[in-house]
Amino acid sequence: MASMIYLIHEYYKKRNTYHFGVQIVKQSVVVAIDPEYEILNRIKQVDQAIVNALGYFKNSETNFSTNDNDVTFWCSHRNQRDYRQVYINDSNITSKFNFSLPAAFLIHGWFDSVNRTWMNSTISAYIHNIDSNICGVDWTRLALTEYSIAATNTRIVAKQLVKFIQYLQLFSTVSLKHYTLIGHSFGAQVAGIAGHQLNGNVGRIIGLDPAGWLFTKPVPISTDERLDKSDAHFVQCIHTNANYFGIGATMNCGHQDFYPNDGLSPQPGCNEPANESGMTYFSITCSHFKAVQYFLFSLNPANMFKGWKCSLGYYWWEAGFCKSKNYDLFGMYSST
């Protein structure tokens, strides 16, 4: 399947109304940036990140040691809405995981964890709208460190995720074609690496503003170490901070790549009046997490995130050259 670039236009209107493509969708007010990611709260995490980084460099000659608790899996489904940790060789596995259902895996990114509000909200919305298992993949200690170290750690996380999925497949009546990997930032790259190690047999991967630096920029690395369209039967990406000096990838990574508002920072609700460049901490972080918000809202079937293929580019789309009756939806309800 050829790669496709899809463009979604969003702008704010009165009465908290959003416009996606040609459909008006009413939503409640959302905070543009989760308070957990405000700069003061981020600074509080720096001490632990320094400790983790120093530990990495101290042990670099003897290899950085990891253990089973560095990557954990917290699963839920409609009949078990509270997270329960699931282990490899778990004696209670059948009470924690419904092997007759599909499965999804939600993977966080740098300086993040499974306990974040966006992870909780996404998992709750997922099982509310989709009859499936969903597991949060937690790799907090490996993510809470210097950027290049965390980027390297994505391979460790992917390896553990593959082992976990292979363990589940020993009991499951559902094939890998019904498994979905969803990752934000570094998590999207974890999904891609894991998908590659599973020989591209996973049904779907959704990359939420995949991390760019050390993966696709300044130069792309090997496709077996980053997300690309060979990693699953269907790979869909959304880009919300694709500025060159932003966090996200600047190149396509899937069969479909969605670029709301040209995929650039600042996304709607993320600009600061005093600085219109879109390259402040707030605008970059807010825009990077817009991908998460878009995916969360897209889980409600009433919210249609329409995108039109447009090889000409965003400004030609805005001028009306690419609009047609043919569109696809971002998220789990894509027709592909």
Image (cartoon, grey):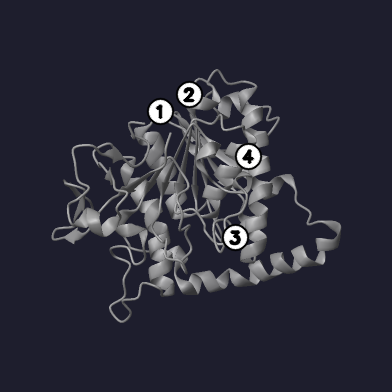
**Cα distance, mark 1 to mark 4?**
22 Å
Residue under the image location 21 percent in, 48 percent down: 21
Circles 1, 3 touching at the beta carbon (< 8 Å):
no
The residue furthest front is 312
The crowding category of the residue bearing disc 1, from other C-alpha atoms within 10 Å (few below 14, some 14 to 19, many at least 20), is: some
Kind of element beneath mark 4: helix
The residue that label 4 is drawn on is: 161
Identify the amino acid type marked 3. Leu
Between marks 2 and 1, how big is the CA–CA gap? Answer: 7 Å
Q: Secondary structure at mark 2?
A: loop
Q: CA distance from mark 2 to mark 4?
A: 18 Å
Alpha carbon separation for disc pair 3 and 2: 36 Å
**Residue at coordinates 48% horizontally, 23% vertically from top-left?**
101
Front of the two marks 2 and 4: 4
> On the picture, is 23 further left or further right than 84?
left
Q: Nearer the viewer, mark 3 or mark 2?
A: 3
Q: Quadrant of residue 140?
A: bottom right
Q: Amino acid at mark 4?
A: Leu
Q: Kindly indicate the quadrant of the structure image that contains residue 272.
A: bottom left
Q: Earlier in the sequence, mark 2 or mark 4?
A: 2
For residue 195, above or below residue 115: above
Mark 4 or 3, closer to the camera: 3
Q: CA distance from mark 1 to mark 3?
A: 36 Å
Q: CA distance from mark 4 to mark 3?
A: 21 Å
Label whose residue precedes the other's in the sequence (1 or 3): 1
| Residue designated by label 2 | 101
Instruction: Determine the secondary structure under disc 3.
Output: loop
Q: Mark 4 or 3 closer to N-term?
A: 4
Q: Residue at x 81, y 67 (%)?
A: 58
